[in-house]
Image (cartoon, rainbow, N blue to C red):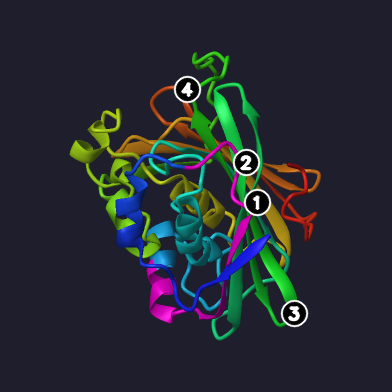
Amino acid sequence: MTTKELRSAPRLAPLYAKAILPSRGGETLPDTEYFRQGIEIEPAHLAAYNQVCGFRLHDELPATYPHMLAFPLQMALMTQPEFPFPLLGMVHIANRITQHRPVRLGETVSMRVRAENLRPHEKGRQFDVLSELSTEDGVVWSEVSTYLRRGGGEGSSQTKQLAAPSPNAIWRVPGDIGRRYAEVSGDRNPIHLHPVTAKLFGFPTAIAHGMWTKARTLAAFEGRLPGAYTVDVRFKLPVLLPAKVAFTSWETSDGWAFELWNAKKPRPHLEGTISSAATPDPRAGR
């Protein structure tokens, strides 16, 4: 595997310009790893992230925050010419994060990102983007983001009619949450920013970022989480903005399970689990 070390975070605006270009890659994922070291977390950025996602303000990073550090490297990886799929049009279908120990402000960290495991999906092809955050203690956080490239699959496109569970809470999601999250995350995919730009990609209005919905649900568990845990989610139907969503959770033998639904009709947005059985291998269970 070839490692490309970056001295600073990639500039996202040029990468989004590249994202609209058709892919020139082949049929395999590039054998390339992006690496950046000496990363210092900015207190103001962490505070802005916590506020937009519903976390309390303190110096311990939410488990979803290191995704902010991984995202520019992921963008650089998936917009390189040899990547087999164009970035726009890919669907983030699952995300698994393992926190091996809490990370705090003042720590200097490094991040590495690579893509693996291209495989069939009933609606096309899927692959994993693996990210690892390390300190002097070694790997302290890892993430597996699973993406779907639609086309060529044989699965059904019909959505099963389900009965929504009784909610623990009802949340109102404002129409500008996509723009607010984009400001802190750098993820300015046009489907999240405005109804007009979302309609260009087939959505009736702007949709919430999947990683915002994951962070918002994780914030509901603050004060109850162990130091080391895995939070694993499957993204279902998008949250059309503005929205009213229903959150429900229940205890399991090793943590919690949770779901997010449309509050007006039985349409699932997200389902996930939190487990204290953390593993240092980000590919475990995939």
Mark sitting earlier along the chain (1/2): 1
Mark 1 neighbour density, 10 Å: few (under 14) some (14–19) many (20 or more): many
Mark 4–mark 3 contact, CB under 8 Å? no
Q: CA distance from mark 3 to mark 2?
A: 29 Å
Residue ID at (79%, 57%):
279
Contact check, label 1 and label 3, Cβ < 8 Å: no
Task: Residue 272: give its label.
Answer: 2
Mark nearest the camera among 4 and 2 is: 2
Residue that carries the numbered disc 4 in the rendered image: 266
Q: Label 4 amino acid?
A: Pro
Up-down relation of residue 100 to residue 18 (above or below): below
* Element at label 3: loop
Q: Which mark is residue 137?
A: 3
Q: Amino acid at mark 3?
A: Asp
Residue 33 on image: x %, y % = 61, 61
Q: Which mark is residue 231?
A: 1
Q: Magenta includes 228? A: no
Which residue range is magenta in the image?
25-48
Q: Which residue is more in the foreground, 128 or 60?
A: 128
The amino acid type, in three-letter code, at marker 2 is Gly
Q: Against 66, is 171 above or below?
A: above
